[in-house]
Image (cartoon, grey):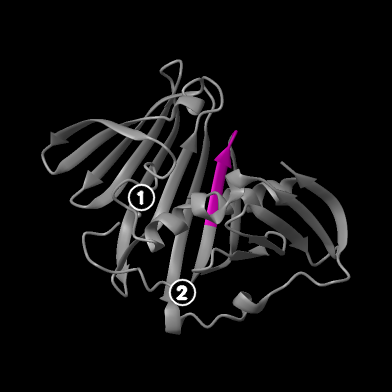
């Protein structure tokens, strides 16, 4: 399901400041452009994202095909397609908004990007000029698939993150850049993720955020969107 995968890429796409802020975060909205590159093909999606401090995130993609995704801190996901009036639902903790990059930055967790909360432990810190490079050991239940996570800060801002699997192969890289400060929150307006599912193969996803608004300035009607009651459920799953 192409639209489904596009939405999950946007969501999964994907933070603590040394400044004392963000505890009062209530609402956030931004325009979003996502570009996915794989096998010589490019898919560009445009839309808007609205996220509440209660953990509800709504993504409205306008192109290439209109659709809405609602997901929660519990990992409940609803993907609605207006054209067909169909909704795809599932529940899986990996899709929790508390696993998203938006959550880490808006909740001021950028010193470790949520690694401590996920059970990772700091095993090494080194310095290279103005860079602070930390290496994190995964929790025991993930040690069969992950060897370590490396996180790089420039100043107090995270700029790079990589995941190395149990076979010492880097399987994911993430770059955070074009930072802006909005009401005391340092937020990367661009995030690039590169996944390496197989040797010699890579999938690149680039997310660009613009027109960022927070709390009282976040007044988008998207916050009030709900899936129509007459939408046809085409699949329902719980994991």
Asked which secondary structure carries label 1, the reply is strand
Mark 2 to mark 1: distance in Å?
A: 23 Å
Of the residues under marks 2 and 1, which one precedes in the sequence? 2
Stretch in magenta: 34-39
Q: Toward the viewer: 198 or 164?
A: 164
Magenta region's main secondary structure?
Answer: strand
Residue 37: within the magenta? yes
Which x, y percent locates residue 138?
A: 41, 29
- Number of residues whose C-alpha sits closer than 10 Å to that of mark 1, classed few (under 14), some (14–19) or many (20 or more): many
Q: Is residue 178 left or right of residue 3?
A: left
Image point (24%, 45%), residue name: 153
Asked which secondary structure carries label 2, the reply is loop
Which x, y percent locates residue 83?
A: 82, 65
Question: Which labelled disc corresponds to residue 90?
Answer: none
Image point (18%, 41%), residue name: 131
Where residue 184 sits, quadrant-wise, is bottom left
Name the front one of labels 2 and 1: 2
Residue 95: within the magenta? no
In the picture, which quadrant includes the C terminus? top right
Residue bearing mark 1: 176
Q: In this rendering, is residue 106 above or below 213?
A: above
Where residue 231 sits, quadrant-wise, is bottom right
Question: Which labelled disc corresponds to residue 26?
Answer: 2
In the picture, which quadrant includes the N terminus? top right
Q: In this rendering, is residue 148 above or below 3?
A: above
Image point (29%, 69%), residue name: 21
Which x, y percent locates residue 51?
A: 53, 67
Image point (76%, 69%), residue name: 227
């Amino acid at each position: 399901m192409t639209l489904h995968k596009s939405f999950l890429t946007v969501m999964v796409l994907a933070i603590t400041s040394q400044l004392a802020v963000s505890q009062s975060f209530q609402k956030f909205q931004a325009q979003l452009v996502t570009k996915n590159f794989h096998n010589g093909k490019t898919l560009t999606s445009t839309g808007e994202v609205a996220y509440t401090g209660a953990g509800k995130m709504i993504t409205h993609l306008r192109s290439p095909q209109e659709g809405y995704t609602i997901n929660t801190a519990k990992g409940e996901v609803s993907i609605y397609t207006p054209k067909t009036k169909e909704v795809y639902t599932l529940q899986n903790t990996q899709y929790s908004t508390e696993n998203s990059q938006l959550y880490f930055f808006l909740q001021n967790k950028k010193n470790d990007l949520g690694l401590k909360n996920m059970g990772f432990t700091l095993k090494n810190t080194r310095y290279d000029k103005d860079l602070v490079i930390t290496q994190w050991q995964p929790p025991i239940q993930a040690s069969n698939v992950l060897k370590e996570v490396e996180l790089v800060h420039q100043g107090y801002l995270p700029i790079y993150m990589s995941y190395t699997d149990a076979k010492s192969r880097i399987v994911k890289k993430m770059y955070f850049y074009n930072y802006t400060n909005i009401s005391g929150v340092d937020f990367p307006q661009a995030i690039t993720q590169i996944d390496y599912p197989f040797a010699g193969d890579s999938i690149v996803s680039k997310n660009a955020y613009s027109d960022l608004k927070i709390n009282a300035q976040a007044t988008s009607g998207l916050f009030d969107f709900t899936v129509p009651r007459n939408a046809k459920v085409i699949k329902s799953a719980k994991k």
